[in-house]
Image (cartoon, rainbow, N blue to C red):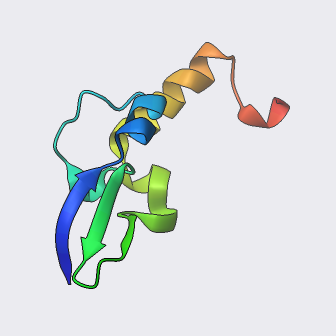
Amino acid sequence: MIVSYRCDKPMARSKGLLPCKKTCKSCVCCILRDDQGSERHALGGQRERSDPRLRARNLRLRGFFGGDFKDW
């Protein structure tokens, strides 16, 4: 059972997701703590599909750098 949420602020800062919109359950920077003290990121492997702000940021970056990332 999840007992608390917290923000991974360094991660949020590096991804450009600050200031926080308080949508923890759909944010890639959210860390969940369960009743046994284990912590994990909220979205696991679903990152970009579930966080609309991160998706918008990545689309802006693609436009800024001229298209697809596979050319890097």
Q: In this view, does 43 lie above or below 62?
A: below
Q: In this view, does 54 lie to the left or right of 45?
A: left
> In which quadrant of the rendered view does residue 69 lie?
top right
Q: Position of residue 24 (x, y in %)?
A: 22, 53
The residue located at (60%, 14%) in the rendering is 64
Q: Quick one: which residue is furthest to the front in this view? A: 37
**39 over 64 or under it: above or below:** below
Front residue of 42/55: it is 42
Query: Residue at the location (47% across, 55% down)?
Result: 47
Q: How many labels does the image show?
A: 0
Q: Residue at x 69, y 17 (%)?
A: 66
- Residue 58 sits above or below residue 51 on the image: above
Q: Is residue 54 above or below residue 26?
A: above
* Location of residue 13 in the rendering, given as x and y in whole percent from the top left corner: 40, 30
Q: Quadrant of residue 20?
A: top left
Say left or right for 5 vs 30: left
Res. 52 image quadrant? top left
Instruction: Give the camera-side residue of 28 and 32.
Output: 32
Q: Quadrant of the N terminus?
A: bottom left
Where does the image place residue 5, in percent across and percent down from the top left? Answer: 21, 60
**Percent position (x, y) of residue 14?**
48, 31
Instruction: Pick whichever, 69 or 39, lies toward us.
Output: 39
Which of 34/60 is in front? 34
> Image quadrant for the C terminus?
top right
